[in-house]
Image (cartoon, grey):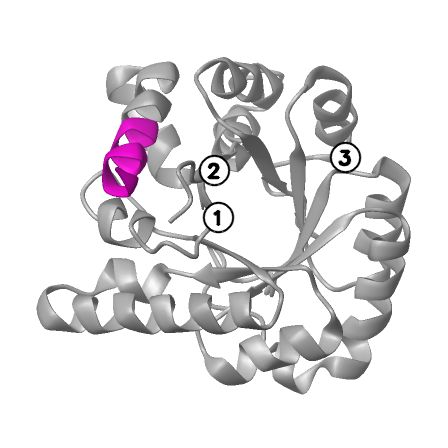
Amino acid sequence: MSAHLRLGVNIDHVATVRNARGGVHPDPVQAALIAQAAGADGITAHLREDRRHIRDADLDELMAALTIPLNLEMAATDEMLEIALRHRPHAACIVPEKREERTTEGGLDAASQDNRLLPLVERLSAANIRVSLFIEPDARQVEAAIRLKAPVVEFHTGRYAELDGQARVAECARIADAAKLAVEGGIEPHAGHGLTFDNVAPIAAIPELAELNIGHYLIGEAIFMGLEASIREMRNRMDAARS
């Protein structure tokens, strides 16, 4: 079991609040710097087609301000590929995207999109951008990621977060099995979506996982306890699960 499970903090919803009113406050770049100081290992930002939260200018400012890695979440489109190649973030996580959804509703169906995804993975990798595929914890999807030579997969934990009791235990076991399969295939597994103080420990305890990406919940809790305290509490719970 790795001693350190990385925490990526998604700052999208600071931008959501900013955009609700217009103007420049609250500033997602300031949130990213607070997260960096509070112990985040990386910052995640999703530039959506409709720019509903993060905007292009935010990426410029994040790249200039951060000393920890930036993970750009992006749809599998030519526009987003060109933006990623122009900005050269540390990592790019390819996610499914539907304009009408409130948030990402599930994993990418990598198994049925080889022809679309392969050139994206190849071009991003050639630019020294670490490619991740956001997928369901399913053997078929992991095998597709291996076939596509993606160095990282991020498992969608939304279903886990919505379940309870034995159903949640079973879903956690499914995530653990998928993480083992990824490692066996030479892929580094991450996880994220819907993780909270109350449900993070069983996921954090999966020894193969190298990173969790958490955003909406941390930004929501920041309203009550402050962003730095919210991130430090999540960091403490992740560390406790690994100890």
Name the element at disc 3.
Answer: helix
From this view, report whether residue 35 is shown above or below residue 206. above
Where is residue 108 shown, x and y percent of the image?
A: 58, 71
Residue name at image x 34 percent, y 38 percent: 217
Looking at the image, tell me whether mark 1 or mark 2 is earlier in sequence order. 2
Q: According to the image, label 1 marks what residue?
A: 210
Residue name at image x 57 percent, y 15 percent: 33
Asked whether residue 240 is drawn in magenta, I would say yes
Q: According to the image, label 2 marks what residue?
A: 6
Amino acid identity at mark 3 = Asp
**Disc 1 residue crowd, few under 14, some 14–19, many 20+, Cα 10 Å:** many
Residue 95 picture quarter: bottom right
Residue 160 picture quarter: bottom left
Where is residue 43 shown, x and y percent of the image?
A: 58, 32
Where is residue 119 shown, x and y percent of the image?
A: 86, 70
Viewer-side label of 3, 1:
1
**Disc 3 residue crowd, few under 14, some 14–19, many 20+, Cα 10 Å:** few
Real-space Cα separation, disc 1 to disc 2, in angstroms: 6 Å
Looking at the image, tell me whether mark 3 or mark 1 is earlier in sequence order. 3
Name the element at disc 2.
Answer: strand
Q: According to the image, label 3 marks what residue?
A: 56
Residue 124 picture quarter: bottom right
From this view, report whether residue 85 is shown above or below residue 145. above
* Marks 2 & 3, CB-CB < 8 Å contact: no
Asked whether residue 14 is drawn in magenta, I would say no
Q: Which residues are magenta?
A: 234-243
Where is residue 169 shown, x and y percent of the image?
A: 18, 67
